[in-house]
Amino acid sequence: MTENNITGNNIMEKYLPAFDSCLQHEKPFCMSECPLHLDVYEFIDRIREGRFNAAYKAFRNAAGFPAIAAELCSGPCRAVCPLHAENAGAESDAIELNLLERACIEYADKKEPTAYNLPRRSKKIAVAGAGISGMACALRLATKMYSVTIFEKADEIGGTLKDIMDADIYKKDFELQMKHLETDLRCGCEITSADQLTAEGFDAVYLATGKGGTDLSVPLTDNGEPCMMLGDAGLFAGGSLLGHDKIHALGDGLAAATAIDNFLMTGNLIYPTYRKTKMVLDESRITPGRTAAAADGCDDRDPLSISRNDAVHEAERCLRCQCDSCRIYCDLTEYVHKWPLRIRDEILATTAPGSADIKATPAKRLINTCTHCGLCKDTCPQDIDLGGLILSARSKMHKLGKMPWVFNDFFLRDMAFSNSEAACLCRPAPCADHDSDSRQSGHENEKRTCTYAFFPGCQLGASDPELVSGSYKHILEHEKDTGIMLGCCGVPAVWAGDDILHDGEISRIKTQWESLGRPTMILACPTCMNNFQRYLPEVKTVFLYDLMAEWMSANAGSDSAGGTAGPGPADKFAIFDPCATNDGDSVRRSVRKICSGSGIQTVPLPQQEQHSACCSYGGHGSIADSRFADMVRERRISESDAPYIVYCINCRDAFLGKGKPTYHILDLLLGREPRLSTATKRRENRIEMKEKILKEIYRESPADADSSAAASSSAADAGSAADETDNIRLEISDELKEKISSEHMLEEDIRNVVAFCERTGRSVYDTEKDTFSGYRKIGRMTHWVEYRRSADPSALILVNAYSHRMEIELELIWNGEKIDTDVQ
């Protein structure tokens, strides 16, 4: 049984807890270290845009007193910047945020603080100490319209700032920022006991009396936080009194103001704490560089000043640190411009119980677009499995009846055809005399078992039957006791969310496997391998390419890979590893070994070899969003100008369809020229593959095998209309065949629609175009055709064809005549 059926409808819930650890909103390293918790994203962006007034406002919002802060800043952010020399190399400099702070102060021409006409609050706060910490706390509380009294034992404000900077700087900044605020400043008034404060009825007190200043003879921390109750008042402490340097003292004052405001509004005595960031930055984003301040090598420049242009340049160097591996490596999140947390919420809304007609389903198309390459989880530092959530959402949507059938109908029909009598085959190894003209009886085949069985998957033979028959012949040269199983592994049912259907397909494979004596399965498709390992763990599997590499080693010096191995049509190739092999180092090494041993020179695909992304086939999302599939293919193709070697036939066909020279490893080894096949031709190829293997390897004639008549029968079972084309010869241009295939239609269905229109007369004649138009519903899809008569009375010419998921309600009158609406 599938995992979804085992665990029930709540399978999605196992993926949800990991999202709580998402690092999307983690602070950048610099902001985490900044005592003022400056919003570096906003600040840097404003500088980058040359908007110094806006940058000044952002800095003032964080620092309270921006000019003082710029002077006090000790630059704790520099050491944690990914561009610092210790992190990025000797030829790199950290972003000089302090220079940018000074630049916004120097170049901003609108520094006047806003005057707010708000009602005053009744609560009273005492601030003991008019140094930088006390003044910062007073500034914020006065801005919130509290009644603030500042006690300072000296004759003027500033505390020890006068010892470390020009008094003109801090006095002007104090005056400017508090210009529109009302406070009660009491200089020359020292607080020596708590009784002085409680007597005046203060609701909260902030102690910022400086290094060696009074602590009112009370403990300054409660449960590790610098706050406690002092009678009915909340007592908070910070700054140099607690041993902090000046820039952290400024931060303490601002934080204490927030804590006091919260205390007065809620009664909760909580001092703000700031944890270190958990930010994880993808190293590929780090490009070392020198700061603009040192770029020109001038020795006479002011080390505390920077030009406008240099400030903009310095801001542009910022990496804007963010954990965005999911956006870098996951095609889907980048395409929809959404982060995993939002996608999660939309998925939950879409899969909530209730009719899709009355509930929002914002992620319906997104859920069916995912390629399930697994990169979201593989590259996420928190192991968030977005793809797993999406796959489980498909299952839940199917159970709720919300899954749009149109996204998966074509692929399920294709799977049904692959597993029908027309294309499916299960045989033990051919008799020892399989090269003779003698035939094997079906009764004999039923009794025999085998050590190995070749399971090439449903797509390899659909692209080129010779790739399967040639590989099987080669396998028999090395492992004579090898049977064969032709069919689909059932993954389309997984991607459609149909667990019951998938269980049936897995059961069918298991029954066939057991009938062959439980052989080791030789697989050629990476997707099949993953499906077997997950849903048939009892079946021992091995990759065809691993065996080929072993045989090559055992027969060094000969053409052990089988076929016409050679350098191929290009000097060098790039090996494109399919996403289904992200955990398959062995098969990756084997393919490279085969190429090397066959004289094929390869060049690396750096990104693909580190994290293999999808070619666009996975998840069958091409119908849900063809533009996304096109984007994915273009991305993969753009990684190298060299032609690709692949060992997933879906990768080959996806890239060939975009004009990228691409060869399956078996194309090169068996001397095959890769060609694309239409959807209709792929079905014909499967029939040909089965007949070819029966005839050439098992020496069974087509009469003994399943004839093409069975193919028509099975096609009907797979959702096609009953065959009415015996008397219809429909001429279809190659261009129109490609269009029909690209829109996931079958020529057989189109012929049946034309035959239906001809038989029933249900068509509309266009006198100007001399064409007939009509439609017919086949399976769940409505197909439309436009055709005209040919000079040959036995032939018709197809002009156009298309399909949609609408169902037409027929009326009783057609062309003026009463008709039977149930005609088939």
Image (tube, rainbow, N blue to C red):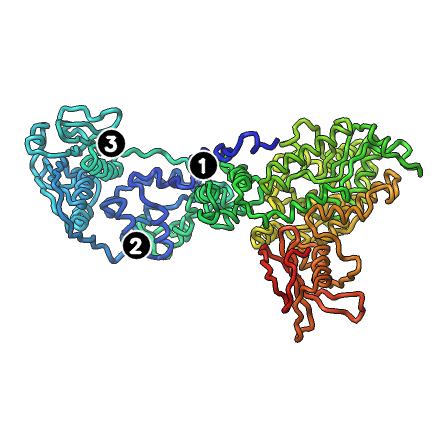
Residue closest to the eye, 296 or 616: 616
Q: Amino acid at mark 3?
A: Ile
Q: Residue at x 12, y 38 (%)?
A: 124
Query: What residue appears at the point 69 percent right and 28 percent down from the top-left corner?
Result: 539
Which residue occupies the extreme right position in the image? 437
How far separated are the C-alphas under marks 2 and 1? 34 Å
Mark before the other along the chain sequence, 2 or 1:
1
Location of mark 2 (residue): 54
Residue position for label 3: 270
Q: Where residue 367 sits in the image (x, y, percent)?
A: 53, 45
Q: Nearer the viewer, residue 118 or 103?
A: 118
Q: Which residue is mark 1?
A: 19
The answer to whether residue 755 is left or right of residue 585 is: right
Q: Counting other residues with Cα less than 10 Å from the Cα at mark 2, is it few (<14), some (14-19), or many (20 or more)? A: many
Query: Which image quadrant: the C terminus?
Result: bottom right
What quarter of the picture does the N terminus occupy? top right
Of label 2 and label 3, which has the lower sequence position? Answer: 2
**Disc 2 + disc 1, Cβ < 8 Å:** no
* Residue 721 drawn at (x, y percent): 70, 52
Q: Is residue 266 left or right of residue 814?
A: left
Q: Nearer the viewer, residue 626 or 501?
A: 501
Q: Amino acid at mark 1?
A: Phe
Quadrant of res 106: bottom left
Residue drawn 47% across and 45% down?
355
